[in-house]
Image (spheres, rainbow, N blue to C red):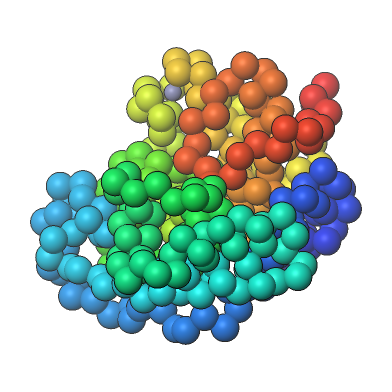
Amino acid sequence: MSRLTREGWLDRHDYLRGIAEVSACLDRVAAGLPDGAPSLLAWDGHQDEFLAGVPLLQSSNVVIDLEPVGRSVIALVERLAADPAAEKMAAEAGALAAELKHDRDAPGRIVSWLLGDESWTPVAPGLLTLLGWTAMRRFLASIVEGFARWRDEERWLRNYCPLCGLGPVMAQLIGKDPGRKRLLVCGRCATRWQYKRTRCPYCEHDVERTSILAVEGEGGLRIDHCESCLGYVKTYDGEGDEALLLADWTSLHLDLLAVGRGWKRLASSLYALPPDAAAVEEPA
Ligand SMILES: [Zn+2]
Ligand SMILES: [Zn+2]
C-alpha cells in the first residue's frame, strides 16, 4: 500500500529538489548494470560468526566476491563523466575516471575503500561513496533478501548492520502491539534489522520513554531522540512507503530540524546536509 509519490513529496519539499536530482542521476547511470550476486550462499557457515556479532561482509567462512562491484563502479564513474545532464558531478567524475583509468588494481581498491580501508584516498571521496554504494546495493540486493530469510533476528539485536557493519541511518516501526517491532535501517546496503524499541542505537542506553517529535504532514516520519547522548533517529512509523521514506535523502529537512534543536546527527548517512536548505516548520 503506497500512498506517496516522489513527485508529490518533492512538490511539498521543494528544497529537496537538488538532492533528488543527484539521486535520479545515480539511478540513471546505474540502470542496466549486470546482475548481482547469487542469493544462495552456504549460510550455515556463517552461524558462529553471526552469533559472535561479525557482519556478513567480514565473515571468514562465507566469502562473497565483490570484485564485480569495483568494475561496476568504474563503469558508473565513466558514464557519469560522459553524462551531459550530470553538470557539477560530471567534472568530479571526470577527475575520478582519470585517476582510475591506468590503475589495474582499481576494482579491488575501490571495494576495500568502500568497506573502510583508509590506505587510499580517492580524488572525490563523497561522489565515490555515493556511486560505490549505489553499485554495491544493487549487487547485494538478493543477498540482503536471502540473509534476512536465513538469520534469526532475535539473535542479533545489535546497533550495527548484520550485513555490512555500519550503524543505522534511520528506523522503522512495524506491526501492532503486542508484536510491534522496531527495525534499524542501513543507509549503505539497505538491510533492515530488528533492535530493541526502547534502546538508543547510538549510546545503547535504555530509555523508559522515548522522546518523540512527530512532524505534521510528513507521512508518518518522526524524530526519536535520546536524552543521554542527544543522538536522534529519524523514524518511519508506518509501512508501504519504504522506498521513499527510508531513502534518507528524502528527509534531510528533518535532520536540519533536529540539528537546529541541538541534537546530534550520529546517523551513518551517505549525504551531507544541504547548507542552504530551509528547515520545516517546528510543530506547535
Ligand atoms: Zn549495511
Ligand atoms: Zn543515546
At a point 62% along the width and 27% down the height, the residue shown is: 212
Q: Quadrant of residue 147?
A: bottom left
Q: Please give left or right for residue 14 compared with residue 74 in the image.
A: right
At a point 51% along the width and 64% down the height, the residue shown is: 98
Q: Quadrant of residue 67?
A: bottom left
At a point 67% along the width and 62% down the height, the residue shown is: 90
Position of the N terminus, as image quadrant, is bottom right
Of residues 140 and 176, the one drawn nearer to the viewer in this rendering: 140
> Which residue is outermost to the right?
11
Of residues 274 and 269, the one drawn nearer to the viewer in this rendering: 274
Location of residue 241 in the rendering, given as x and y in whole percent from the top left corner: 66, 59
Question: From the viewer's perspective, is residue 179 above or below residue 201?
Answer: below
Q: Is residue 122 visible?
A: yes
Location of residue 213 in the rendering, given as x and y in whole percent from the top left corner: 67, 27
Question: From the viewer's perspective, is residue 190 above or below residue 141?
Answer: above
Q: Please give left or right for residue 223 compared with residue 192 in the image.
A: right
Q: Please give left or right for residue 283 compared with residue 245 in the image.
A: right
Of residues 203 and 83, the one drawn nearer to the viewer in this rendering: 83
Q: Please give left or right for residue 97 compared with residue 13 in the image.
A: left
Q: Is residue 153 visible?
A: no
Picture mark count: 0
Location of residue 239 in the rendering, given as x and y in whole percent from the top left corner: 62, 57
Ligand 2 shows up in which quadrant of the image? top left
At a point 49% along the width and 30% down the height, the residue shown is: 266
Position of the C terminus, as image quadrant, is top right
Location of residue 183 in the rendering, given as x and y in whole percent from the top left corner: 46, 48
